[in-house]
Amino acid sequence: MLTRVENRGAFWSLLTTRGVYALNWYNVASIFSIIGVEFGQGVSGLGALTSSFYLGVGLLQIPGGLFAGKFGPKVTATFGTLVMSVAVLASAAAGQFEVLIVARFFVGVGMAFVFAPAVVLITRYFRSGAEGVALGLYNSAFDVGGAVGLFGWVIVATTIGWRLSLAASGIMGLLTAALLFFLVPRENVTARFSVGAGVLSRVLLDRTLILLGVVSTGIGVGSILISSFVVYYLITALGVAPATAGGIGALVFVVPIVSSPIGGRVYDRRVGFRSICVIAGVATAAATVLAGFGGIYGPLIAALVGGFTSGLGFTMVLAAARERIPAGPEYRTLSVSWVNSIALTSSFLPPIIFSFIANAFGYTPAWVGGGILCLLLISPIVFIRQPSAA
């Protein structure tokens, strides 16, 4: 696969940034059992932090896409990485839980300026015809970072404290911003880009992009709930040691390292797009439900199955979004941003619903409710046309 890379410095800087980006996405969920003790917070506090983050990363996707169209993907991704890193450092210094919630919102804001521009860049540095594979590898880098965040940061935080662990991950973010600045080539920004109401309406009202956003939300619900709550659930409800709980939670990111490139390769061949997305969504929903049963083995299997299917399905949906350009190629970033915005903005609700149900009725009904929500949201896949052969 890597023989198809045309600019290795830019390619590896983007993958490294993606990994650190994911680490800062999930490390708070990993170490919340420590953070919660200091601030006197339980599962509701974790739900609030998670929802705040998803609001930031979801609501700012469209501004991020517009910013990229105006100033270029490189400048946008570098700027977003800087904002993310500074907000992570602010999280480490938070003296009140409310400040931590606000800081996590701005971590999400920074990340909103990174994802879609980096998708456009990473596919640019792969040879034509293998863009789906490039996107799969990019998502695999996210999975590596997510696994380190969920597993490694439990160990780091218990060794040096949660504040120093967040400060370390914030500094890592600043270093990746430097990599983007120095290794990604300067780009010529098109003068054709505009943000008029006509162009925006063609993108934002495009039926296929909206449906892809809803389906992406459905595929992602299980992964979001498993990655956000399973470590805390294992520690507080099942009495599992933090390192073991983090290792189980990290599996939701270990297996997509393999399944994400598979999804990209399958998409490039235009084979069974809708069928595979349906299978991925149903399997993710079943895995979410399973997390609430079988003691430690339910979450273990849920992380394995949910991780594999979410990596497969999410990569295929984003590859389809990248190719859907209703307003011209210079708006490709905006198309990806819009699909991601729908998925991530909608994703602020599942953590709130999950934490409410868990507090009121227990964890098992909460996991079952998450699986049902996942099934409902993937149903619009039947209305999306099968991508044609290249």
Image (tube, rainbow, N blue to C red):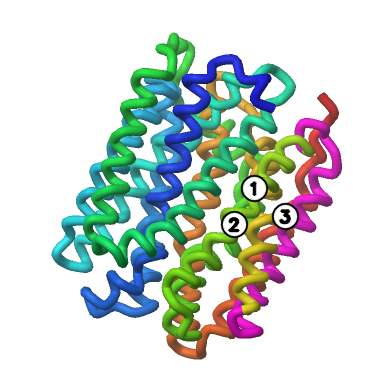
Q: Is residue 207 visible?
A: no
Q: Are marks 1 and 2 in contact (CB under 8 Å)?
A: yes
Residue 339 drawn in magenta: no
Residue that mark 2 sits on: 220
Residue 208 percent location from the top left of the image: 68, 41
Quadrant hosting residue 255: bottom right
Dot placed on the residue nearer the N-terminal end, 1 or 2? 2
Residue 130 lies, with reference to residue 226, above or below; the image says above
Residue that mark 1 sits on: 314
Residue 211 left/right relative to 187? right
Q: Nearer the viewer, residue 342 or 105?
A: 105
Q: Is residue 111 visible?
A: yes
Residue at image coords 39%, 77%: 43
Residue type (three-letter) at the residue carrying disc 2: Gly
Q: Which residues are magenta?
A: 267-296
Residue at image coords 63%, 40%: 318
Residue type (three-letter) at the residue carrying disc 3: Pro
Observer-side mark, 3 or 2, equals 2
Magenta: main secondary structure: helix
Residue 337 percent location from the top left of the image: 51, 37
Residue 293 drawn in magenta: yes
Query: Callout 1: few (<14), some (14-19), or many (20+) C-alpha neighbours within 10 Å?
Result: many
Residue that mark 3 sits on: 380
Q: For the residues marked 3 and 2, what is the alpha-carbon distance in whole angstroms?
A: 14 Å
Look at the numbered disc 1 and give the secondary structure of its residue.
helix
